[in-house]
Amino acid sequence: MYLKYVQIVNFKNLKNVCFEFSKGANTIIGENDSGKSNALTAIRILLDDNYYYNTKRLKETDFSYALGDWKGHWIIISAFFDEISNEDKHNEFCAEITPEQENIDFLKSYIRCTDKDFGTVSLFIRPCRTKRIELAEAAQNGTFESVRSQIKLSDYEFYYTARSQADFTDEKIYKSIVGDICAGQYVNPEDDDQSVLGCKIDIMNVWQHISTVFIDALRDVESELRKPKNPIRQIIDTIEGDIKENDIDDIKKKISELNAKIANIPQVSDIGKQVNRKLLEMIGAIYSPEIKLESRLKEDFATLARYLTISPSNQADIDLLGLGHLNILYIAMKLVEFEVNRNRELLNIMIIEEPEAHIHTHIQKTLFNNLQVAHTYTQVVMSTHSTHLSEVSDIEKVNVMKKVDEQTSLVMKPTNGLDRFGTDVLECKGISFAKILSRYLDAKRSVLLFSKGVILVEGDGEEILIPALTKKVLGVSLDEMGIGLINIGSVGFENVACIFDESRLQRKCSIVTDLDVVVEGAKKSNQTAMDRGASRRKKLSQLFGENPYVSAFYAPHTLEVDFVSEESNKDFVCSVIRNTYKDAAVIERHVSTIKSGTEAERYDSVMTVANNIKKGWYATLLAETIDARAVIPMYILDAIVFAAKDILSEKLLWKMVQYSFEQYLPDSDFDDLKAAFKEAKSSKEIQTTIKKFCAEFPEDMVSLFIAKCLIVWGVYLRRFHQNSRLHVRPKIIFC
């Protein structure tokens, strides 16, 4: 038995999402404020008996931010458990959560299930029955909004069910059980469909059979280990029944003897005599009680467990361990606790927030690998920002969260339909394409799972030079934009780009590759390379031509050649040549060719230089040489625009424009524009100033970037209002 799905509806920024988990260790990744912590909290609300949450703790901010007015709406958290074994089915709890046989076919039409046995547990945070009747009646007589406006948080109830038979993230299902509140419609509780909602259960019974522990990102391990209910105590409580009776009797006897020895210590017994003497002096012999000072160490084993602790064998105290080792120790102890608790729990779920906290890179990876618990009754769900953990994560066990806007996030599965794509499209027969891709995504490449937009490149030159050009010419880094640049190390872009799709990762992915068009007369240009470039273009077009999340951008020749084709860039290349070569004649020949040679001569010269220096090192030297005067080749600029399509904001564009305008400040002819920049405070003033800058400097790279953004995005006169949870558009566009 394991937790397979968790549906969350209307909880904080999780409007309607579904998480899919597997046996062993599962990972939730995503940008800051995407909702990772909210997701873990929702799971705890339903399954963790140590997380106290009821109507008294319910807040208005717990409802989905996208609802606008929360009143009348429901919060729904539903868990789907799969592979309930024949052994587990004998348990009364499993029978309670498992649908009756006649309802199984009906259930399969609602949610994704396997051929094995399954069960569900759900929580509905909803208005109480009386209020729902009032709302339903008000919807009939035209007073719905008036009645709804009077609802308070105290009117809500926590209603737990099992055997619920619906995908609650489906808006139609939600409206069928709640109503269409926006349309002034509300479902009367008399019409509740128990086949959809499920049968009422006692949540305490769930908590008795499913053990859930939460390990906070800001955990104080030392304090946790010193609590009466620490993992050691929990383990001892469980194994006490397995300890031999003779061993326990022997301990009790020794404790009794120890108590007697303590009481007979002269200094201890003398204290008792002194107290008796003082009592005689105070109240006399008639009323004075006879007392003695004695030791009362508890003889029961459970009490003794309180005094058990752990310490490193080579150190005096656990306090001397570092935070990283303390974190690992605590996680290890909880796993041991889960193992020994198997005789009473059907499933143990460990929820860990940021397990990488205070832990060295290599230990992070080792830890995660060893958390791949083999037993089906121990399951790990963790959130992380670490690319090192994502590197060793099975991509099939990863849920990626994407912040759609300030109000909502969505959950994406990178492997949805990926094996089918590998078999049918890429013709990878007899293998799991998802597993191969998982091995391919090392710490460097797995950054694509965390990025808001992605650029795929084929070599070291692009990997080094594109980020440098972006920062020095546009004034912001790719990281600041949230764009991850991944060096594929080949031209097999389709093997990675296939992750970006409507059904998988809904993020923009730009592919940057070379066409290697033959330059007539150039010795280092050849037809074979051009044919490969044309073939690659055809293939990418066939694979992704209809995919709105993937677009390819082609260098007419190569980055080295196309960069120097821009007049402004020739000086930077010549500077690299002068600083690298020692022979004056060779330097002069290359510099002269770069500046005034024919296209073919320039092609051969720059490729000779790049190959002699080695392309990666050449790009590194060039990246150090360029400044704001450099020109970004248009195909690269187009690739950045596409990758940033769902990202850029007015604030970021404003920063770009300010940076670029600083390059013109020494010129005193722009007093009016200087004043506009200085005075711009409101959004309208900022947009007006940006338009003035673009009009004054239409050939500036930032102006060209903005112009390309307007073409890609479309022209809008107001801030974009998000109306779809599946598609994202830019936050601001202006004309």
Image: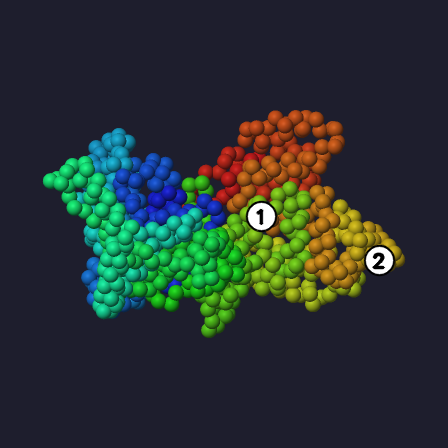
Residue 448 numbered tag: none
Residue 211, position as x, y percentages in the image: 30, 57
Residue 401 x, y percent position in the rendering: 44, 51
Q: Residue furthest left?
A: 286
Disc with the residue nearer the chain's start (2 vs 1): 1
Can see residue 339? yes
The amino acid at mark 1 is Asp
Extreme residue toward the bottom, this view: 430
Q: Front-most of 552 and 731?
A: 731
Work out whether residue 250 or residue 228 is closer to the camera in this orientation and state it. Answer: 250
187, above or below 343, in the image? above
In the image, what residue occupies the spot 34% across and 41% down?
A: 63
Residue type for callout 2: Lys
| Up/down of 533 relative to 568, above or below | below
The quadrant of the picture occupied by the C terminus is top right
Q: Label 1: state its secondary structure.
A: helix
Indicate left or right for 165 with 38 as reference.
left
Closer to the camera in the image, 714 or 137? 137
Return the residue at label 1: 479
Residue of label 2: 582
Q: Secondary structure at mark 2?
A: loop
The part of the image, by quadrant, that contains residue 1 is: bottom left
| Total residue callouts | 2
Residue 61 in the image: x percent, y percent? 36, 38
Please provide percent x and percent y for residue 519. Answer: 75, 60
Residue visible at 16% across and 46% down in the picture: 290
In the figure, is residue 569 to the left or right of 651?
Answer: right
